[in-house]
Amino acid sequence: MKIVVLTGSPRRNGNSAYLAEQFIKGAQEKGHEIYRFDCAFKQVEPCRACNRCGMDGPCVIKDDFNELRPHLIAADMVVFATPMYYFGISAQMKRVIDRFYAINGQIKGHYKKAAYLMTYADTAKKEAEPMLLHYHTLMDYLGWESVGEVVASGVWTAGSIRNTRYPEQAYQLGKSL
Ligand SMILES: Cc1cc2nc3c(=O)[nH]c(=O)nc-3n(C[C@H](O)[C@H](O)[C@H](O)COP(=O)(O)O)c2cc1C
């Protein structure tokens, strides 16, 4: 499969990046092709809602989204790896997702697998619910199928996830494909 992995953290060696790496390791061992796009390190402007794309056409903004665009359209699977920022996905990732608008016609209703890798500092399960609801609602809208979610709680400092069970879960998810 062609798998696009979107990471959303500005911490290169952070927790969600580590989950993404473990997922990638497992998936590559099974021979899948990975295209990784680190949203926080790319120049991607937010959608301007000009509607010139008509939800299915060229975007007026010429930036790094153009690099990602063909990979997203061709992908068999898309993985979202993000920290929780105030009970939502990171802004760095959200601005990339909002640019899906210009390719909506080419990705909505075109079956893809998906996975969600999320990290947060608190331990209350309830606090992860808004992000999971957003992800599942997005999958329903696009007609994509979520094949796995790693919800890593209790990780605050960059890299603290290494001593938990979550990296293994991400690795096994990649390996299971
Ligand atoms: C701007 C900001 C907002 C955050 N908001 C939350 C939050 O709402 N709930 C929470 O439990 N942790 C929150 N955190 C902590 C991160 O989710 C946590 O440290 C996570 O493991 C970071 O992942 P990363 O290492 O991939 O960046 C926040 C951190 C930052 C920098």
Image (cartoon, helix red, strand yellow):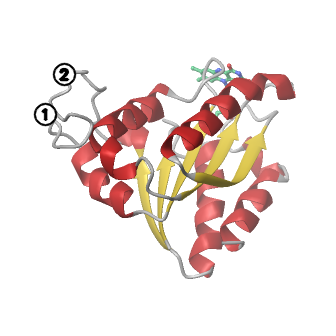
Q: Is residue 97 left or right of residue 87?
A: left
Query: Which residue reaches farthest top?
Result: 86
Badge 1 is on which residue? 60
Report x, y in % for residue 151.
76, 42
Q: Could one spot residue 123 in this view of the protein?
A: no
**Location of residue 118 by image quarter:** top right
Q: Which of the numbered marks, if any, corresponds to residue 50?
A: 2
The quarter in which the C terminus is drawn is: bottom right
Q: Could one spot residue 22 in this view of the protein?
A: yes
Q: Residues within 10 Å of mark 1 (few under 14, many from 20)?
A: few
Q: Residues within 10 Å of mark 2 (few under 14, many from 20)?
A: few
Relative to 63, does residue 110 appear above or below in the rendering?
Answer: below
The structure residue drawn at horizontal position 66% and vertical position 20%, both measured from the top left corner, is 87
Viewer-closest of 29 and 17: 29
Relative to 104, does residue 131 appear above or below in the rendering?
Answer: above
Report x, y in % for residue 45.
27, 29
Relative to 91, does residue 37 appear above or below in the rendering?
Answer: below
Give the amino acid at mark 2.
Cys
Ligand 1 quadrant assignment = top right
Report how far apart the C-alphas of labels 1 and 2 lie in the structure. 9 Å
Give the amino acid at mark 1.
Val
Query: Which residue reaches farthest front?
Result: 109
Q: Is residue 155 left or right of residue 131?
A: right
| Disc 1 and disc 2 in contact, CB within 8 angstroms | yes
> Which mark sits nearer the N-terminus, 1 or 2?
2
